[in-house]
């Protein structure tokens, strides 16, 4: 049926808003060699089914509203950069399992629901500090375009691999669809059963010497489960979990091609993920990314680094959440362990004083990256923990809610971050350094962080 005359102008207005970013400066966009091929790939994407349903985005928004009110805690985790080769059943299972294991421990510590959100099923594009990379190859200095994620080019250091290829964006769609399908199967099909997840945690604490100090908490969780069962809680209630998908909305052509009108409400949603976030490098108030995010109805995250002023934060709220909708806006702070205690208080205090209710989430990874003596990009587990501790201290002093944790992690036993109970040293980094971009916490470090944060939550 053709749209009624009354509806047509509204639709046209909505489209104009969704495309307003095209006239603005867009940071960190690939230099596609052939615009026509990009347009053809985007035309194909625009015909493909949504990856998520707008109603699910609304449900996540509601839950993030609870996070903002201090009634829930957010756990957001996954790779820095997903890769096509890494979208295997084992790797996906490992990440889902790690997030679920962490969530059980955090739920116990927080005594509120934990919202589970993967940096998964779409996290294929990366902003970079430099647009190019120089290496010495066969004694000669060679400079090529930087790797910008599998969405854009390939990690191999050759001119062919590093040339941006827009057809990769169709592979992003396919890899995201496959990943999301398996996540849904795992989390709805019995893999996520609370008793099973707890058994994994118990086994892990028992078998890993480094985790022995958490045995008491594991036993307490066991008792809580037995108590619930004794009270007659229906075990079927604990067989499934809601698990959402998120990624950085970096490549705006891709995000726009997957933006659709919700058939129920007529409102636009970016159906490439439940939540999308803007990065520290792309959150300019007059830039294309903020304009794009302003036009969609998904819950939105914004990374905020140590140079963010309270005025920046208030202006972001005005642009992205003018109606002060609960759960619409999450600030993901990434200050660095050395800066958080000075940089965060004024930001939180002024945003709170303005009456805006945002969710505050701690990314303790991106402010703590450095190059190790052995030449690997790494992070110290102790710095990660210290930043989270600073985050809790600041919120405690202000009487605000430390709403969640955003971490780069994998379920594999990689050696990318140093420290933790396993005592991973600088010299160990080369043993299994597999990330395509930033160093991730491995399975053990992730669980250890969850137990430590559960203690911080319980102390509140
Ligand atoms: O994941 C975040 C960024 O893409 C990453 O930290 C940038 O890393 P770079 O400084 O190596 O470009
Ligand atoms: C690019 C990232 O972070 P930030 O924008 O905070 O640097 C990231 O989350 O991988
Ligand atoms: Mn990263």
Image (cartoon, rainbow, N blue to C red):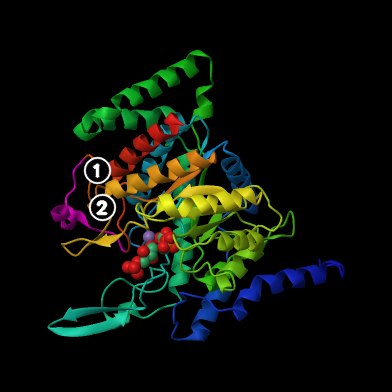
Reply yes or no: does residue 423 show up in magenta: yes
Above or below, comparing residue 313 to residue 46 in the picture: above
Which residue is painted at 49% across and 68% down in the image?
250
Provide the residue designation for mark 2. Answer: 417
Which of these two is toward me, 271 or 65?
A: 65
Above or below, comparing residue 323 to residue 23 in the picture: above
Tag on residue 282?
Answer: none
- The stretch in magenta equals 422-436
Q: Kindly tell me whether residue 74 is visible in this rendering.
A: no
Distance Cα–Cα, label 2 vs label 1: 9 Å
Which of these two is toward me, 104 or 344?
A: 344
Above or below, comparing residue 192 to residue 352 in the picture: above
Quadrant for the N terminus, please. Answer: bottom right
How far from the left and from the top, in percent, is residue 316?
Answer: 60, 62
Reply yes or no: does residue 427 show up in magenta: yes
Which residue is painted at 59% across and 78% down in the image?
24
Which residue in the rendered view is the most extreme toward the top? 230
Provide the residue designation for mark 1. Answer: 420
Res. 261 image quadrant: bottom right
Q: Residues within 10 Å of mark 2 (few under 14, many from 20)?
A: many
How far from the left and from the top, in percent, is residue 116?
Answer: 48, 43
């Amino acid at each position: 049926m053709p749209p009624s005359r009354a509806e047509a102008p509204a639709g046209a207005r909505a489209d104009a808003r969704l495309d307003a970013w095209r006239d603005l400066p867009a940071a960190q966009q690939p230099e596609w060699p052939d615009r026509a091929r990009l347009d053809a790939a985007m035309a194909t994407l625009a015909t493909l089914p949504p990856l998520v349903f707008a109603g699910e985005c609304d449900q996540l928004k509601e839950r993030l509203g609870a996070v903002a009110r201090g009634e829930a805690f957010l756990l957001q985790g996954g790779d820095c950069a997903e890769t096509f080769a890494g979208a295997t059943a084992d790797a996906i299972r490992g990440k889902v399992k790690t997030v679920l294991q962490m969530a059980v421990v955090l739920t116990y510590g927080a005594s509120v629901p934990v919202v589970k959100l993967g940096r998964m099923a779409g996290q294929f594009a990366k902003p970079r500090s430099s647009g190019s990379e120089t290496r010495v190859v066969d004694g000669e200095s060679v400079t090529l375009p930087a790797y910008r994620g599998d969405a854009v080019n390939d990690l191999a250091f050759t001119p062919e691999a590093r040339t941006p290829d827009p057809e990769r964006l169709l592979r992003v769609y396919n890899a995201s669809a496959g990943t999301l399908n398996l996540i849904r199967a795992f989390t709805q099909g019995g893999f996520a059963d609370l008793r099973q997840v707890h058994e994994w945690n118990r086994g892990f604490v028992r078998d890993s010497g480094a985790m022995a100090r958490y045995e008491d908490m594991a036993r307490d969780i066991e008792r809580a489960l037995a108590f619930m069962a004794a009270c007659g809680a229906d075990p079927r209630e604990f067989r499934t979990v809601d698990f959402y998908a998120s990624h950085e909305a970096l490549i705006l052509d891709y995000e726009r091609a997957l933006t659709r009108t919700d058939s129920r409400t007529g409102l636009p949603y970016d159906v490439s993920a439940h939540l999308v976030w803007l990065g520290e490098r792309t959150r300019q108030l007059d830039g294309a990314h903020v304009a794009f995010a302003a036009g969609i109805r998904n819950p939105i995250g914004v990374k905020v680094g140590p140079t963010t002023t309270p005025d920046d934060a208030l202006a972001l709220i005005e642009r992205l959440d003018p109606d002060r909708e609960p759960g619409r806006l999450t600030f993901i702070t990434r200050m660095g362990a050395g800066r958080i205690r000075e940089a965060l208080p004024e930001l939180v205090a002024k945003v709170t004083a303005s009456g805006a209710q945002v969710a505050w989430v701690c990314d303790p990874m991106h402010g703590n990256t450095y190059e190790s003596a052995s030449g690997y990009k790494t992070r110290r587990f102790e710095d990660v923990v210290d930043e989270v501790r600073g985050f809790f201290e600041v919120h405690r002093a202000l009487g605000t809610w430390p709403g969640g944790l955003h971490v780069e992690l994998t379920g594999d036993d990689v050696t990318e971050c140093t420290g933790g109970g396993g005592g991973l040293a600088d010299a160990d980094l080369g043993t299994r350094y597999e990330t395509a971009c930033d160093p991730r916490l491995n399975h053990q470090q992730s669980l250890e962080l969850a137990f430590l944060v559960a203690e911080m939550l319980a102390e509140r």
